[in-house]
């Protein structure tokens, strides 16, 4: 079946696809052009629902019209068995999105999104996985700033620890996103949102040191963070994770992830007395409810809310 993606940012030439792959290609283009998802996010959605589409689209492409709620439930039970809660939730989210798309496109008569069962899991049930006090300083101190790699890694860790950036936001940072005169950074976040963050002096100094004495010269890429060894090109999210992991091992902190540094930045702000509204601004949460989990870290404030236990004092 010939398909041409004419609205996506990444245009695909018309090629001969099987009926199942044609549906997946149309769905991918819909996610990017209509829902505003990034290319990598759209691909993730497609891969999660690929088994469902392949199973229910016959060679002549007619099986989708016969989809039932039972088919949907059976797929969720099979696909989510043995998965973590987070992975299962991503799967059912992608499936609901696909079913809405199929209904909008007229490939199924009614929306079956409501037939997708919910995954058992409770919001705000856990605690942010923040590092112990002083761990971020140890991570940055582990970088040998006398080397090109050390200066780059120090800049990465400084941006992650001070501005609570996501690894994906860090690798999308471009030279044009740094407004030196205004002292601001333009961050390209989730949902293609662009927000400005202040550029603290220590972060600016780490960036300047790397840009002057660490970033490879030449090349067409405008990415701030580049590979040290040729062929020079932008760092990937995986490479940033490796930088953080190696720093954790050098500093004796253990296995550390970039998202832990984001949690740590928010937790340290809370411990310093910052209100949740300011933490939400730093984390660039769209809704304050997303930041509410950090309230559980402030044990002293929570202690004042505890009711006395019958027969003894609250501890």
Image: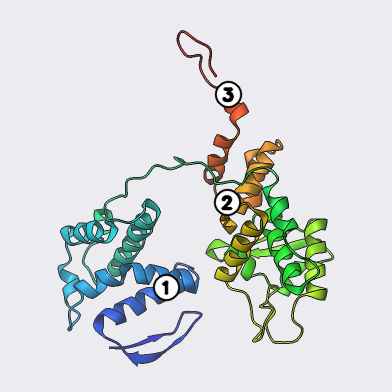
| Rendering coords of residue 163 (x, y %) | 69, 55
Residue 271 in the figure: left or right of residue 27: right
Give the structural element (helix, strand or loop) at label 3: helix
Give the structural element (helix, strand or loop) at label 2: loop
Give the quadrant of the N terminus. Answer: bottom left
Numbered label attached to residue 43: 1
Q: Mark 1 Cα within 10 Å, few/some/many (few <14, many 20+)?
A: some
| Rendering coords of residue 6 (x, y %) | 44, 84
- Distance from label 1 to label 3 (Cα)? 45 Å
Residue 256 in the figure: left or right of residue 227: left
- Which sits in the foreground, 236 or 176? 236
- Distance from label 3 to label 2 (Cα)? 26 Å
- Distance from label 2 to label 1 (Cα)? 24 Å
- Which badge, 1 or 3, is on the more N-terminal residue? 1
Observer able to see residue 52 = yes
Give the quadrant of the C terminus. Answer: top right
Quarter of the figure with residue 128: top right
Disc 3 vs disc 2: which is toward the camera?
3
Q: Marks 2 and 3: in contact by CB < 8 Å?
A: no
Give the structural element (helix, strand or loop) at label 1: helix
Disc 2 vs disc 1: which is toward the camera?
1
Quarter of the figure with residue 291: top right
| Rendering coords of residue 7 (x, y %) | 46, 80
- Which badge, 2 or 1, is on the more N-terminal residue? 1
| Residue that carries the numbered disc 3 in the rendered image | 303
| Residue that carries the numbered disc 2 in the rendered image | 285
Q: Mark 2 Cα within 10 Å, few/some/many (few <14, many 20+)?
A: some
Q: Is residue 214 above or below residue 133?
A: below
Which residue occupies 33% across, 56% down? 83
């Amino acid at each position: 079946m010939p398909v041409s993606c004419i609205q996506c940012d990444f245009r695909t030439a018309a090629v001969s696809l099987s009926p199942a792959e044609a549906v997946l290609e149309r769905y991918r283009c819909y996610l990017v052009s209509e829902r505003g998802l990034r290319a990598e996010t759209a691909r993730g959605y497609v891969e999660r629902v690929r088994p469902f589409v392949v199973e229910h689209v016959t060679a002549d492409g007619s099986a989708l019209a016969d989809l039932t709620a039972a088919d949907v439930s059976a797929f969720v039970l099979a696909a989510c068995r043995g998965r973590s809660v987070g992975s299962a939730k991503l799967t059912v989210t992608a499936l609901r999105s696909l079913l809405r798309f199929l209904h909008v496109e007229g490939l199924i008569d009614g929306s079956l999104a409501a037939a997708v069962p919910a995954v058992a899991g409770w919001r705000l049930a856990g605690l942010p996985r923040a590092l112990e006090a002083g761990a971020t300083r140890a991570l940055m101190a582990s970088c040998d700033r006398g080397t090109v790699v050390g200066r780059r890694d120090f800049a990465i860790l400084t941006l992650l620890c001070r501005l609570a950036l996501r690894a994906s936001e860090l690798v999308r940072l471009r030279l044009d996103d740094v407004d030196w005169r205004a002292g601001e950074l333009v961050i390209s976040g989730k949902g293609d949102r662009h927000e400005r963050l202040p550029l603290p002096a220590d972060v600016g100094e780490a960036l300047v040191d790397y840009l002057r004495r660490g970033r490879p010269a030449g090349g067409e890429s405008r990415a701030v963070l580049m590979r040290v060894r040729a062929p020079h090109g932008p760092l990937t999210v995986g490479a940033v994770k490796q930088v953080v992991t190696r720093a954790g091992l050098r500093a004796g902190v253990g296995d550390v992830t970039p998202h832990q540094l984001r949690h740590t930045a928010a937790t340290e702000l809370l411990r310093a007395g910052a209100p949740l509204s300011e933490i939400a601004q730093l984390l660039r949460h769209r809704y304050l409810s997303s930041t509410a989990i950090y309230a559980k870290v402030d044990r002293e404030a929570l202690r004042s809310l505890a009711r006395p236990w019958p027969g003894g004092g609250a501890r």
